[in-house]
Image (cartoon, grey):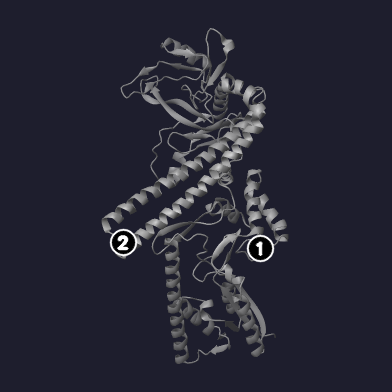
Amino acid sequence: MTKFLDCYFRVSTQEQTKGQSLDTQQEYGRKIAKKLNLKFRARDEGARSSTIGFRPRLEEIKEDIEKGLVKHLWVFDRSRLFRDETDSVLFRRNYLEKFDVRFYEGEAGNLCNFDSLEEKLTYDIVSKLQQYENEKRSHKSKQGKRYLLRQGVSNRHYGGTVLFGYKSIDGVLSVDELESKWVLFIFNSVLEGKSTMDIKKVLDTDGKTDGVHPRRTSDKNWNIGTLESILRNRSYIGEKEFYDKELDVTFTYTIPPIVSRSTFNKVRNEMEKRRKTQDNNKKHTTIFGDYMVCECGEKIGSTVKVGKRKDGSSFNTKSYYCVTRERNWKKAKETNCSNRKSMNMDMADEYLISKIRDVVSDSVILKEKFKHDVLSKKFDKDADIKERETKLEEKCRKLIRRQEQTYENIISMETDLVQGRREKKITEGIIKNLTVELETLKNELKKTELEIEDLSEEKIWLDWLERYGDDLKTKVSTSTENQKEWLDGLIRKIVVLVEYGEDRDGNIKQLGHKFEVLFRIPVVRDKLVYHDKNDKSKGYSVKDGVSKLTTQTVNLQKGRGKKKDLKQGKEEGFNYNHRSNLFSNGRVVPNGRTLTRVICV
Protein backbone atom coordinates (compact mmCIF):
# COMPACT_ATOMS: atom_id res chain seq x y z
CA MET A 1 0.00 0.00 0.00
CA THR A 2 1.37 3.43 -1.07
CA LYS A 3 2.22 5.72 1.80
CA PHE A 4 1.66 9.43 1.24
CA LEU A 5 3.06 12.59 2.71
CA ASP A 6 0.14 15.05 2.64
CA CYS A 7 1.61 18.53 2.21
CA TYR A 8 -0.63 21.48 3.09
CA PHE A 9 0.06 24.80 1.30
CA ARG A 10 -1.57 28.17 1.89
CA VAL A 11 -0.84 31.86 1.42
CA SER A 12 -2.84 34.78 2.80
CA THR A 13 -3.29 36.85 -0.38
CA GLN A 14 -3.87 36.33 -4.08
CA GLU A 15 -0.78 38.42 -4.73
CA GLN A 16 1.45 35.80 -3.12
CA THR A 17 0.27 33.09 -5.53
CA LYS A 18 1.93 35.04 -8.34
CA GLY A 19 5.22 35.20 -6.43
CA GLN A 20 7.32 32.41 -5.01
CA SER A 21 5.46 31.62 -1.78
CA LEU A 22 3.27 28.71 -2.93
CA ASP A 23 5.95 27.42 -5.30
CA THR A 24 8.50 27.51 -2.50
CA GLN A 25 6.23 25.55 -0.16
CA GLN A 26 5.62 22.91 -2.83
CA GLU A 27 9.33 22.58 -3.58
CA TYR A 28 10.14 21.93 0.07
CA GLY A 29 7.21 19.51 0.36
CA ARG A 30 8.53 17.38 -2.51
CA LYS A 31 12.02 17.30 -0.97
CA ILE A 32 10.70 16.22 2.43
CA ALA A 33 8.55 13.48 0.81
CA LYS A 34 11.59 12.15 -1.06
CA LYS A 35 13.69 12.29 2.12
CA LEU A 36 11.06 10.25 4.06
CA ASN A 37 10.57 7.84 1.17
CA LEU A 38 6.88 8.81 0.91
CA LYS A 39 4.78 9.78 -2.10
CA PHE A 40 4.13 13.52 -2.35
CA ARG A 41 0.42 14.50 -2.20
CA ALA A 42 -0.50 18.21 -2.46
CA ARG A 43 -3.25 19.79 -0.39
CA ASP A 44 -3.26 23.24 -1.97
CA GLU A 45 -5.49 25.80 -0.21
CA GLY A 46 -4.31 28.62 -2.48
CA ALA A 47 -4.88 32.23 -1.39
CA ARG A 48 -7.11 32.13 1.69
CA SER A 49 -6.78 33.90 5.00
CA SER A 50 -6.50 31.73 8.10
CA THR A 51 -8.79 34.10 10.01
CA ILE A 52 -11.63 34.43 7.49
CA GLY A 53 -14.15 31.86 6.36
CA PHE A 54 -14.13 28.19 5.49
CA ARG A 55 -10.95 26.45 4.29
CA PRO A 56 -12.00 23.43 2.20
CA ARG A 57 -8.58 21.70 1.90
CA LEU A 58 -8.02 21.82 5.67
CA GLU A 59 -11.48 20.35 6.27
CA GLU A 60 -10.69 17.59 3.75
CA ILE A 61 -7.52 16.77 5.70
CA LYS A 62 -9.50 16.49 8.94
CA GLU A 63 -12.07 14.17 7.31
CA ASP A 64 -9.35 12.01 5.73
CA ILE A 65 -7.52 11.75 9.08
CA GLU A 66 -10.73 10.41 10.64
CA LYS A 67 -11.06 7.91 7.75
CA GLY A 68 -7.45 6.75 8.20
CA LEU A 69 -6.37 8.11 4.78
CA VAL A 70 -3.83 10.59 6.18
CA LYS A 71 -0.99 9.25 8.33
CA HIS A 72 1.82 11.69 7.47
CA LEU A 73 1.27 15.45 7.36
CA TRP A 74 3.74 18.28 6.58
CA VAL A 75 3.45 22.09 6.63
CA PHE A 76 6.05 24.76 5.92
CA ASP A 77 5.27 26.33 9.28
CA ARG A 78 2.46 25.81 11.75
CA SER A 79 0.89 29.21 11.04
CA ARG A 80 -0.10 27.83 7.61
CA LEU A 81 -2.57 25.64 9.51
CA PHE A 82 -3.64 27.91 12.37
CA ARG A 83 -2.85 31.36 13.72
CA ASP A 84 -4.72 30.77 16.94
CA GLU A 85 -3.07 28.81 19.76
CA THR A 86 -6.34 27.19 20.84
CA ASP A 87 -7.12 25.87 17.34
CA SER A 88 -3.58 24.51 17.06
CA VAL A 89 -3.77 22.65 20.40
CA LEU A 90 -7.23 21.22 19.60
CA PHE A 91 -5.95 19.98 16.23
CA ARG A 92 -3.09 18.23 18.00
CA ARG A 93 -5.39 16.52 20.53
CA ASN A 94 -8.40 15.69 18.35
CA TYR A 95 -6.65 14.66 15.14
CA LEU A 96 -2.84 14.19 15.31
CA GLU A 97 -2.69 12.33 18.64
CA LYS A 98 -6.09 10.66 18.49
CA PHE A 99 -5.50 9.08 15.04
CA ASP A 100 -1.72 8.61 15.42
CA VAL A 101 -0.74 10.98 12.59
CA ARG A 102 2.98 11.80 12.21
CA PHE A 103 3.35 15.57 11.91
CA TYR A 104 6.35 17.22 10.18
CA GLU A 105 7.15 20.90 9.74
CA GLY A 106 9.77 23.29 8.44
CA GLU A 107 12.41 23.20 5.74
CA ALA A 108 14.07 20.15 7.33
CA GLY A 109 10.83 18.25 7.90
CA ASN A 110 11.30 17.91 11.66
CA LEU A 111 9.01 15.35 13.28
CA CYS A 112 6.89 16.55 16.21
CA ASN A 113 6.82 13.73 18.74
CA PHE A 114 3.79 13.72 21.06
CA ASP A 115 4.84 10.72 23.13
CA SER A 116 6.15 12.80 26.04
CA LEU A 117 4.75 15.67 28.06
CA GLU A 118 7.84 17.72 27.19
CA GLU A 119 7.18 17.35 23.44
CA LYS A 120 3.53 18.30 23.86
CA LEU A 121 4.51 21.32 25.95
CA THR A 122 7.07 22.36 23.32
CA TYR A 123 4.39 22.08 20.59
CA ASP A 124 1.98 24.26 22.59
CA ILE A 125 4.67 26.86 23.43
CA VAL A 126 5.71 27.14 19.77
CA SER A 127 2.04 27.58 18.82
CA LYS A 128 1.73 30.36 21.41
CA LEU A 129 4.88 32.08 20.14
CA GLN A 130 3.71 31.87 16.55
CA GLN A 131 0.37 33.38 17.53
CA TYR A 132 2.21 36.25 19.24
CA GLU A 133 4.42 36.87 16.20
CA ASN A 134 1.41 36.82 13.88
CA GLU A 135 -0.48 39.28 16.07
CA LYS A 136 2.57 41.58 16.19
CA ARG A 137 2.95 41.49 12.40
CA SER A 138 -0.79 42.09 12.00
CA HIS A 139 -0.64 45.12 14.33
CA LYS A 140 2.30 46.64 12.41
CA SER A 141 0.50 46.02 9.12
CA LYS A 142 -2.66 47.75 10.37
CA GLN A 143 -0.69 50.73 11.66
CA GLY A 144 0.99 51.08 8.27
CA LYS A 145 -2.33 50.90 6.42
CA ARG A 146 -3.88 53.53 8.71
CA TYR A 147 -0.96 55.88 8.14
CA LEU A 148 -1.23 55.61 4.35
CA LEU A 149 -5.02 55.93 4.41
CA ARG A 150 -4.91 59.02 6.60
CA GLN A 151 -2.41 60.56 4.21
CA GLY A 152 -4.91 60.02 1.38
CA VAL A 153 -2.58 57.71 -0.58
CA SER A 154 -4.47 56.46 -3.67
CA ASN A 155 -4.13 53.36 -5.86
CA ARG A 156 -3.01 51.19 -2.96
CA HIS A 157 -3.85 47.57 -2.27
CA TYR A 158 -4.46 47.26 1.46
CA GLY A 159 -4.67 43.49 1.70
CA GLY A 160 -7.13 40.74 0.87
CA THR A 161 -7.99 39.44 -2.55
CA VAL A 162 -7.23 41.82 -5.40
CA LEU A 163 -10.47 43.00 -7.04
CA PHE A 164 -11.23 41.32 -10.37
CA GLY A 165 -10.19 43.67 -13.18
CA TYR A 166 -7.15 44.95 -11.26
CA LYS A 167 -3.62 43.80 -10.47
CA SER A 168 -1.33 44.67 -7.58
CA ILE A 169 2.38 45.20 -8.07
CA ASP A 170 4.35 46.05 -4.91
CA GLY A 171 1.11 47.08 -3.20
CA VAL A 172 0.05 49.47 -5.97
CA LEU A 173 -3.25 48.82 -7.79
CA SER A 174 -3.56 49.26 -11.54
CA VAL A 175 -6.04 48.15 -14.18
CA ASP A 176 -5.48 44.67 -15.59
CA GLU A 177 -5.84 45.05 -19.35
CA LEU A 178 -7.40 41.64 -20.04
CA GLU A 179 -9.66 41.37 -16.99
CA SER A 180 -10.92 44.96 -17.36
CA LYS A 181 -12.29 44.09 -20.82
CA TRP A 182 -14.38 41.36 -19.20
CA VAL A 183 -15.53 43.76 -16.47
CA LEU A 184 -16.87 46.04 -19.22
CA PHE A 185 -18.44 43.01 -20.89
CA ILE A 186 -20.32 42.19 -17.65
CA PHE A 187 -21.69 45.73 -17.27
CA ASN A 188 -22.55 46.24 -20.94
CA SER A 189 -24.26 42.83 -21.14
CA VAL A 190 -26.75 43.91 -18.46
CA LEU A 191 -27.61 47.00 -20.51
CA GLU A 192 -28.10 44.77 -23.56
CA GLY A 193 -30.76 42.85 -21.64
CA LYS A 194 -28.72 39.75 -20.80
CA SER A 195 -29.35 37.99 -17.49
CA THR A 196 -26.59 37.21 -15.02
CA MET A 197 -26.99 33.54 -15.98
CA ASP A 198 -26.35 34.44 -19.63
CA ILE A 199 -23.23 36.36 -18.58
CA LYS A 200 -22.03 33.44 -16.42
CA LYS A 201 -22.29 31.03 -19.35
CA VAL A 202 -20.13 33.23 -21.56
CA LEU A 203 -17.54 33.72 -18.79
CA ASP A 204 -17.42 29.98 -18.07
CA THR A 205 -16.70 29.25 -21.76
CA ASP A 206 -15.12 32.16 -23.66
CA GLY A 207 -13.73 33.65 -20.46
CA LYS A 208 -11.91 30.44 -19.57
CA THR A 209 -10.51 30.24 -23.09
CA ASP A 210 -9.23 33.79 -22.62
CA GLY A 211 -7.60 32.75 -19.34
CA VAL A 212 -10.03 34.71 -17.16
CA HIS A 213 -11.63 33.22 -14.05
CA PRO A 214 -12.89 34.36 -10.61
CA ARG A 215 -10.48 34.71 -7.74
CA ARG A 216 -11.71 32.13 -5.23
CA THR A 217 -13.20 29.08 -6.91
CA SER A 218 -11.45 25.75 -7.24
CA ASP A 219 -13.26 24.81 -10.49
CA LYS A 220 -12.68 28.31 -11.95
CA ASN A 221 -16.39 28.68 -12.70
CA TRP A 222 -18.33 31.87 -11.99
CA ASN A 223 -21.36 32.11 -9.74
CA ILE A 224 -24.28 34.53 -9.82
CA GLY A 225 -23.44 36.07 -6.44
CA THR A 226 -19.95 37.07 -7.62
CA LEU A 227 -21.36 38.74 -10.73
CA GLU A 228 -24.00 40.64 -8.74
CA SER A 229 -21.28 41.78 -6.32
CA ILE A 230 -19.23 43.14 -9.24
CA LEU A 231 -22.25 45.00 -10.62
CA ARG A 232 -22.83 46.70 -7.23
CA ASN A 233 -19.21 47.55 -6.48
CA ARG A 234 -18.45 51.28 -6.72
CA SER A 235 -14.73 50.46 -6.86
CA TYR A 236 -15.18 50.06 -10.62
CA ILE A 237 -15.95 53.80 -10.91
CA GLY A 238 -12.81 54.58 -8.90
CA GLU A 239 -14.27 54.79 -5.37
CA LYS A 240 -12.56 52.25 -3.13
CA GLU A 241 -13.29 51.74 0.57
CA PHE A 242 -11.33 50.13 3.38
CA TYR A 243 -13.12 49.28 6.62
CA ASP A 244 -10.99 49.21 9.78
CA LYS A 245 -12.79 46.88 12.19
CA GLU A 246 -10.85 47.91 15.28
CA LEU A 247 -11.42 51.64 14.76
CA ASP A 248 -14.88 51.14 13.22
CA VAL A 249 -13.90 53.66 10.56
CA THR A 250 -14.35 53.46 6.78
CA PHE A 251 -11.58 55.08 4.75
CA THR A 252 -12.35 56.13 1.16
CA TYR A 253 -9.66 56.52 -1.49
CA THR A 254 -9.45 56.48 -5.29
CA ILE A 255 -8.24 53.87 -7.73
CA PRO A 256 -8.23 53.94 -11.56
CA PRO A 257 -11.85 53.54 -12.80
CA ILE A 258 -12.87 50.89 -15.33
CA VAL A 259 -16.57 51.76 -15.75
CA SER A 260 -18.08 55.22 -16.33
CA ARG A 261 -20.54 56.58 -13.78
CA SER A 262 -23.32 56.81 -16.35
CA THR A 263 -22.90 53.12 -17.22
CA PHE A 264 -22.73 52.17 -13.54
CA ASN A 265 -25.93 54.14 -12.77
CA LYS A 266 -27.80 52.61 -15.70
CA VAL A 267 -26.78 49.11 -14.64
CA ARG A 268 -27.75 49.84 -11.02
CA ASN A 269 -31.21 51.01 -12.11
CA GLU A 270 -31.65 48.00 -14.37
CA MET A 271 -30.63 45.57 -11.61
CA GLU A 272 -33.01 47.30 -9.19
CA LYS A 273 -35.84 46.93 -11.70
CA ARG A 274 -35.04 43.23 -12.07
CA ARG A 275 -34.86 42.80 -8.31
CA LYS A 276 -38.31 44.28 -7.87
CA THR A 277 -39.65 41.89 -10.48
CA GLN A 278 -38.01 38.91 -8.74
CA ASP A 279 -39.22 40.08 -5.31
CA ASN A 280 -42.78 39.72 -6.50
CA ASN A 281 -42.14 35.97 -6.70
CA LYS A 282 -45.13 35.51 -8.94
CA LYS A 283 -45.90 33.64 -12.13
CA HIS A 284 -48.08 36.40 -13.59
CA THR A 285 -47.09 39.67 -15.23
CA THR A 286 -48.55 43.11 -14.55
CA ILE A 287 -48.57 46.39 -16.41
CA PHE A 288 -48.08 48.74 -13.44
CA GLY A 289 -46.52 46.43 -10.83
CA ASP A 290 -43.03 47.89 -11.35
CA TYR A 291 -44.21 51.52 -11.12
CA MET A 292 -46.63 51.67 -8.22
CA VAL A 293 -45.70 52.47 -4.63
CA CYS A 294 -48.01 53.11 -1.71
CA GLU A 295 -48.07 56.46 0.08
CA CYS A 296 -46.57 54.63 3.10
CA GLY A 297 -43.39 53.99 1.09
CA GLU A 298 -43.84 50.27 0.46
CA LYS A 299 -44.32 48.85 -2.99
CA ILE A 300 -47.68 47.82 -4.39
CA GLY A 301 -47.81 44.06 -4.87
CA SER A 302 -50.14 41.98 -6.98
CA THR A 303 -51.97 38.69 -6.73
CA VAL A 304 -53.93 36.45 -9.09
CA LYS A 305 -56.37 33.86 -7.73
CA VAL A 306 -57.93 31.30 -10.04
CA GLY A 307 -60.37 28.60 -8.94
CA LYS A 308 -63.93 27.42 -8.68
CA ARG A 309 -66.74 28.44 -6.38
CA LYS A 310 -68.97 26.04 -4.47
CA ASP A 311 -71.66 26.39 -7.11
CA GLY A 312 -69.20 25.15 -9.77
CA SER A 313 -68.63 28.52 -11.44
CA SER A 314 -65.02 29.58 -12.03
CA PHE A 315 -63.38 32.82 -10.89
CA ASN A 316 -60.22 34.71 -11.81
CA THR A 317 -59.44 37.52 -9.35
CA LYS A 318 -56.54 39.85 -10.10
CA SER A 319 -55.67 42.70 -7.76
CA TYR A 320 -53.06 45.22 -6.61
CA TYR A 321 -52.46 45.78 -2.88
CA CYS A 322 -49.99 47.39 -0.46
CA VAL A 323 -47.55 44.77 0.87
CA THR A 324 -46.97 46.53 4.24
CA ARG A 325 -49.38 44.39 6.26
CA GLU A 326 -48.03 41.19 4.71
CA ARG A 327 -44.38 42.05 5.40
CA ASN A 328 -45.00 43.45 8.89
CA TRP A 329 -46.97 40.36 9.83
CA LYS A 330 -44.00 38.16 8.95
CA LYS A 331 -41.73 40.39 11.07
CA ALA A 332 -44.33 40.67 13.87
CA LYS A 333 -44.34 44.44 13.47
CA GLU A 334 -47.22 46.86 13.82
CA THR A 335 -48.79 48.09 10.57
CA ASN A 336 -48.86 51.86 10.15
CA CYS A 337 -50.27 51.94 6.62
CA SER A 338 -53.91 52.99 6.25
CA ASN A 339 -54.25 51.59 2.72
CA ARG A 340 -56.46 48.59 3.50
CA LYS A 341 -58.31 48.21 0.19
CA SER A 342 -57.02 46.28 -2.77
CA MET A 343 -57.62 47.42 -6.35
CA ASN A 344 -59.02 45.30 -9.13
CA MET A 345 -56.07 44.93 -11.50
CA ASP A 346 -58.01 45.14 -14.78
CA MET A 347 -59.94 48.21 -13.64
CA ALA A 348 -56.78 49.94 -12.34
CA ASP A 349 -54.84 49.16 -15.55
CA GLU A 350 -57.65 50.44 -17.76
CA TYR A 351 -58.13 53.60 -15.69
CA LEU A 352 -54.42 54.51 -15.53
CA ILE A 353 -53.76 53.72 -19.19
CA SER A 354 -56.67 55.98 -20.18
CA LYS A 355 -55.39 58.83 -18.00
CA ILE A 356 -51.84 58.54 -19.34
CA ARG A 357 -53.13 58.35 -22.92
CA ASP A 358 -55.13 61.53 -22.35
CA VAL A 359 -52.01 63.37 -21.19
CA VAL A 360 -50.00 62.06 -24.14
CA SER A 361 -52.60 62.93 -26.76
CA ASP A 362 -53.16 66.44 -25.28
CA SER A 363 -49.48 67.26 -24.89
CA VAL A 364 -48.23 70.11 -27.05
CA ILE A 365 -44.61 69.09 -26.43
CA LEU A 366 -45.22 65.64 -27.80
CA LYS A 367 -47.08 66.91 -30.84
CA GLU A 368 -45.02 69.95 -31.77
CA LYS A 369 -41.57 69.24 -30.45
CA PHE A 370 -41.55 65.81 -32.03
CA LYS A 371 -42.26 67.17 -35.50
CA HIS A 372 -39.91 70.14 -35.39
CA ASP A 373 -37.14 69.26 -32.96
CA VAL A 374 -36.83 65.55 -32.31
CA LEU A 375 -36.67 63.62 -35.55
CA SER A 376 -34.72 66.27 -37.42
CA LYS A 377 -32.19 66.76 -34.64
CA LYS A 378 -32.07 63.40 -32.84
CA PHE A 379 -28.54 62.63 -33.99
CA ASP A 380 -27.34 66.04 -32.79
CA LYS A 381 -29.17 65.58 -29.48
CA ASP A 382 -27.61 62.12 -28.95
CA ALA A 383 -24.16 63.61 -29.61
CA ASP A 384 -24.92 66.50 -27.26
CA ILE A 385 -25.97 64.11 -24.49
CA LYS A 386 -22.78 62.11 -24.97
CA GLU A 387 -20.67 65.29 -24.82
CA ARG A 388 -22.42 66.54 -21.67
CA GLU A 389 -22.06 63.09 -20.12
CA THR A 390 -18.30 63.13 -20.79
CA LYS A 391 -17.97 66.58 -19.19
CA LEU A 392 -19.91 65.49 -16.11
CA GLU A 393 -17.74 62.35 -15.76
CA GLU A 394 -14.65 64.57 -15.82
CA LYS A 395 -16.26 66.91 -13.28
CA CYS A 396 -16.81 63.92 -10.94
CA ARG A 397 -13.14 62.96 -11.24
CA LYS A 398 -12.07 66.53 -10.43
CA LEU A 399 -14.39 66.67 -7.43
CA ILE A 400 -12.96 63.40 -6.09
CA ARG A 401 -9.40 64.73 -6.51
CA ARG A 402 -10.37 67.94 -4.69
CA GLN A 403 -11.89 65.86 -1.88
CA GLU A 404 -8.62 63.96 -1.53
CA GLN A 405 -6.59 67.19 -1.48
CA THR A 406 -8.91 68.70 1.14
CA TYR A 407 -8.69 65.55 3.26
CA GLU A 408 -4.88 65.61 3.02
CA ASN A 409 -4.89 69.27 4.13
CA ILE A 410 -7.04 68.40 7.15
CA ILE A 411 -4.64 65.60 8.13
CA SER A 412 -1.65 67.90 7.69
CA MET A 413 -3.24 70.60 9.87
CA GLU A 414 -4.16 68.10 12.58
CA THR A 415 -0.62 66.70 12.55
CA ASP A 416 0.92 70.17 12.88
CA LEU A 417 -1.51 70.96 15.70
CA VAL A 418 -0.55 67.80 17.62
CA GLN A 419 3.16 68.50 17.10
CA GLY A 420 2.71 72.06 18.35
CA ARG A 421 3.84 73.64 15.07
CA ARG A 422 0.70 75.79 14.69
CA GLU A 423 -1.38 78.08 16.86
CA LYS A 424 -4.33 76.11 18.21
CA LYS A 425 -7.18 78.62 17.71
CA ILE A 426 -6.25 79.56 14.13
CA THR A 427 -5.57 75.95 13.11
CA GLU A 428 -8.87 74.69 14.54
CA GLY A 429 -10.66 77.38 12.53
CA ILE A 430 -8.88 76.31 9.34
CA ILE A 431 -9.73 72.65 10.00
CA LYS A 432 -13.38 73.60 10.55
CA ASN A 433 -13.46 75.48 7.22
CA LEU A 434 -11.78 72.59 5.42
CA THR A 435 -14.31 70.16 6.89
CA VAL A 436 -17.16 72.33 5.60
CA GLU A 437 -15.44 72.44 2.19
CA LEU A 438 -15.13 68.66 2.21
CA GLU A 439 -18.86 68.26 2.89
CA THR A 440 -19.66 70.78 0.12
CA LEU A 441 -17.56 68.78 -2.34
CA LYS A 442 -19.35 65.58 -1.37
CA ASN A 443 -22.75 67.21 -1.95
CA GLU A 444 -21.57 68.59 -5.30
CA LEU A 445 -20.45 65.10 -6.31
CA LYS A 446 -23.90 63.69 -5.48
CA LYS A 447 -25.55 66.50 -7.44
CA THR A 448 -23.33 65.81 -10.47
CA GLU A 449 -24.16 62.11 -10.32
CA LEU A 450 -27.86 63.03 -10.38
CA GLU A 451 -27.21 65.17 -13.47
CA ILE A 452 -25.65 62.12 -15.14
CA GLU A 453 -28.77 60.12 -14.26
CA ASP A 454 -30.94 62.89 -15.75
CA LEU A 455 -29.03 62.58 -19.02
CA SER A 456 -29.81 58.86 -19.04
CA GLU A 457 -33.48 59.74 -18.57
CA GLU A 458 -33.25 62.20 -21.46
CA LYS A 459 -31.79 59.50 -23.71
CA ILE A 460 -34.60 57.11 -22.79
CA TRP A 461 -37.06 59.86 -23.58
CA LEU A 462 -35.54 60.60 -27.01
CA ASP A 463 -35.59 56.91 -27.93
CA TRP A 464 -39.23 56.74 -26.87
CA LEU A 465 -40.14 59.77 -29.00
CA GLU A 466 -38.41 58.29 -32.02
CA ARG A 467 -40.47 55.14 -31.69
CA TYR A 468 -43.87 56.47 -30.65
CA GLY A 469 -43.89 60.19 -31.33
CA ASP A 470 -45.37 60.16 -34.83
CA ASP A 471 -48.45 58.22 -33.71
CA LEU A 472 -48.93 58.80 -30.02
CA LYS A 473 -51.83 56.48 -29.33
CA THR A 474 -52.51 53.94 -32.03
CA LYS A 475 -49.10 52.25 -31.92
CA VAL A 476 -49.71 50.85 -28.43
CA SER A 477 -51.23 47.39 -28.63
CA THR A 478 -53.19 45.66 -25.89
CA SER A 479 -50.34 43.28 -25.03
CA THR A 480 -48.84 43.74 -21.54
CA GLU A 481 -45.28 43.68 -22.89
CA ASN A 482 -45.97 46.41 -25.47
CA GLN A 483 -47.82 48.58 -22.98
CA LYS A 484 -44.95 48.32 -20.47
CA GLU A 485 -42.46 49.31 -23.17
CA TRP A 486 -44.64 52.31 -24.01
CA LEU A 487 -44.88 53.29 -20.33
CA ASP A 488 -41.12 52.95 -19.70
CA GLY A 489 -40.38 56.03 -21.76
CA LEU A 490 -43.09 58.06 -20.05
CA ILE A 491 -43.43 57.17 -16.37
CA ARG A 492 -41.00 57.32 -13.45
CA LYS A 493 -43.38 55.97 -10.83
CA ILE A 494 -46.99 56.08 -9.60
CA VAL A 495 -47.80 56.86 -5.96
CA VAL A 496 -51.04 55.32 -4.70
CA LEU A 497 -52.85 57.61 -2.23
CA VAL A 498 -55.58 56.62 0.20
CA GLU A 499 -58.89 58.53 0.16
CA TYR A 500 -61.33 58.55 3.08
CA GLY A 501 -64.97 59.55 3.17
CA GLU A 502 -68.38 58.81 4.64
CA ASP A 503 -70.03 55.50 3.91
CA ARG A 504 -73.81 55.18 3.70
CA ASP A 505 -74.06 55.12 7.49
CA GLY A 506 -72.00 58.29 7.88
CA ASN A 507 -68.89 56.46 9.16
CA ILE A 508 -65.43 57.55 8.01
CA LYS A 509 -63.86 54.76 5.95
CA GLN A 510 -61.45 54.23 3.11
CA LEU A 511 -63.57 54.56 0.03
CA GLY A 512 -61.05 54.54 -2.77
CA HIS A 513 -57.69 55.64 -4.14
CA LYS A 514 -56.07 58.53 -5.96
CA PHE A 515 -52.92 58.32 -8.08
CA GLU A 516 -49.96 60.61 -8.49
CA VAL A 517 -48.49 59.74 -11.87
CA LEU A 518 -44.93 61.09 -12.15
CA PHE A 519 -43.87 61.59 -15.78
CA ARG A 520 -40.28 61.76 -16.98
CA ILE A 521 -40.81 65.21 -18.53
CA PRO A 522 -43.29 68.08 -17.87
CA VAL A 523 -46.05 67.12 -20.33
CA VAL A 524 -49.06 67.53 -18.01
CA ARG A 525 -51.02 70.65 -19.04
CA ASP A 526 -48.26 72.03 -21.27
CA LYS A 527 -49.45 74.55 -23.84
CA LEU A 528 -48.72 76.75 -26.83
CA VAL A 529 -48.15 80.44 -26.15
CA TYR A 530 -48.63 82.58 -29.27
CA HIS A 531 -46.40 85.63 -29.61
CA ASP A 532 -49.40 87.60 -30.85
CA LYS A 533 -52.86 86.32 -29.96
CA ASN A 534 -54.41 88.31 -32.81
CA ASP A 535 -51.88 87.18 -35.40
CA LYS A 536 -50.93 83.51 -34.98
CA SER A 537 -48.67 83.65 -38.03
CA LYS A 538 -46.09 85.42 -35.86
CA GLY A 539 -45.33 82.11 -34.24
CA TYR A 540 -45.50 80.60 -30.81
CA SER A 541 -43.43 79.01 -28.08
CA VAL A 542 -44.09 75.86 -26.11
CA LYS A 543 -44.58 76.32 -22.37
CA ASP A 544 -43.70 73.36 -20.16
CA GLY A 545 -46.39 71.91 -17.97
CA VAL A 546 -45.72 69.85 -14.85
CA SER A 547 -44.42 66.32 -14.39
CA LYS A 548 -47.11 65.17 -11.95
CA LEU A 549 -50.69 64.16 -12.74
CA THR A 550 -53.01 63.76 -9.75
CA THR A 551 -56.14 61.81 -10.62
CA GLN A 552 -59.59 61.98 -9.11
CA THR A 553 -60.70 59.57 -6.42
CA VAL A 554 -61.84 56.24 -7.78
CA ASN A 555 -63.07 52.99 -6.34
CA LEU A 556 -61.30 50.22 -8.18
CA GLN A 557 -63.10 47.31 -6.58
CA LYS A 558 -65.72 45.48 -8.59
CA GLY A 559 -69.11 46.76 -7.48
CA ARG A 560 -72.35 44.86 -7.44
CA GLY A 561 -75.43 46.25 -9.05
CA LYS A 562 -74.51 49.22 -11.24
CA LYS A 563 -78.10 50.43 -11.69
CA LYS A 564 -78.89 50.22 -7.98
CA ASP A 565 -75.77 52.23 -7.04
CA LEU A 566 -76.48 54.79 -9.75
CA LYS A 567 -80.07 55.29 -8.57
CA GLN A 568 -79.10 55.51 -4.90
CA GLY A 569 -76.30 57.97 -5.58
CA LYS A 570 -78.59 60.34 -7.44
CA GLU A 571 -81.32 60.07 -4.80
CA GLU A 572 -78.81 61.06 -2.10
CA GLY A 573 -77.82 64.19 -4.02
CA PHE A 574 -74.36 63.16 -5.18
CA ASN A 575 -72.96 64.41 -8.50
CA TYR A 576 -72.13 61.67 -10.99
CA ASN A 577 -69.08 62.07 -13.20
CA HIS A 578 -69.35 59.86 -16.30
CA ARG A 579 -65.68 60.25 -17.16
CA SER A 580 -64.35 59.04 -13.83
CA ASN A 581 -67.23 56.68 -12.98
CA LEU A 582 -67.75 58.11 -9.50
CA PHE A 583 -70.12 60.16 -7.32
CA SER A 584 -68.72 62.97 -5.21
CA ASN A 585 -70.26 65.33 -2.68
CA GLY A 586 -67.05 67.36 -2.26
CA ARG A 587 -67.69 68.31 1.39
CA VAL A 588 -64.65 69.52 3.33
CA VAL A 589 -64.09 68.37 6.91
CA PRO A 590 -62.21 70.34 9.65
CA ASN A 591 -58.87 68.55 9.07
CA GLY A 592 -58.78 69.91 5.52
CA ARG A 593 -59.35 66.62 3.68
CA THR A 594 -62.30 66.30 1.33
CA LEU A 595 -64.84 63.67 2.30
CA THR A 596 -65.83 61.85 -0.83
CA ARG A 597 -68.56 59.29 -1.35
CA VAL A 598 -67.24 57.02 -4.08
CA ILE A 599 -69.45 54.50 -5.86
CA CYS A 600 -68.00 52.53 -8.76
CA VAL A 601 -70.63 52.11 -11.52
Q: Quadrant of the N terminus?
A: bottom right
Q: Nearer the viewer, residue 423 or 310?
A: 423
State the image coordinates of residue 76 (x, y, percent, origin top left).
Answer: 56, 81
Dot 1 crowding, Cα within 10 Å, few <14, some 14–19, many 20+: some
Q: In this rendering, which labeled residue sits more in front, label 2 or label 1?
A: 2
Question: In the rendered image, which quarter is residue 22 located in?
Answer: bottom right
Question: Considering the numbered disc 2 on the image, is that residue within a helix, a strand or a loop?
Answer: helix
Question: In the rendered image, which quarter is residue 36 located in?
Answer: bottom right
**Which label number is shown at residue 520?**
none
State the image coordinates of residue 41 (x, y, percent, origin top left).
Answer: 66, 79
Q: Is residue 138 above or below residue 501?
A: below
Q: Is residue 36 visible?
A: no
State the image coordinates of residue 422 (x, y, percent, origin top left).
Answer: 30, 60
Residue under label 2:
417
Which residue corresponds to the image point at 33% horizontal and 62% vertical from the top-left?
Answer: 416
Say whether disc 2 or disc 1 marks the residue closer to the N-terminus: 1
Question: Considering the numbered disc 1 on the image, is that residue within a helix, a strand or a loop?
Answer: loop
Q: What type is the residue that disc 2 sits on?
A: Leu
**Which label number is shown at residue 220?**
1
Would residue 566 appear left or right of 386 to someone viewing this image? left
Q: Is residue 348 above or below residue 72?
A: above
Dot 2 crowding, Cα within 10 Å, few <14, some 14–19, many 20+: some
Q: Is residue 149 above or below residue 280?
A: below
Q: Is residue 462 above or below residue 272?
A: above
Q: What type is the residue that disc 1 sits on?
A: Lys
Would residue 477 appear left or right of 600 to someone viewing this image? right
Q: CA distance from mark 2 to mark 1?
A: 52 Å
State the image coordinates of residue 497 (x, y, percent, origin top left).
Answer: 44, 29
Residue that sits furthest to the left in the current view: 425
Which residue corresponds to the image point at 57% horizontal and 15% vertical from the top-left?
Answer: 539
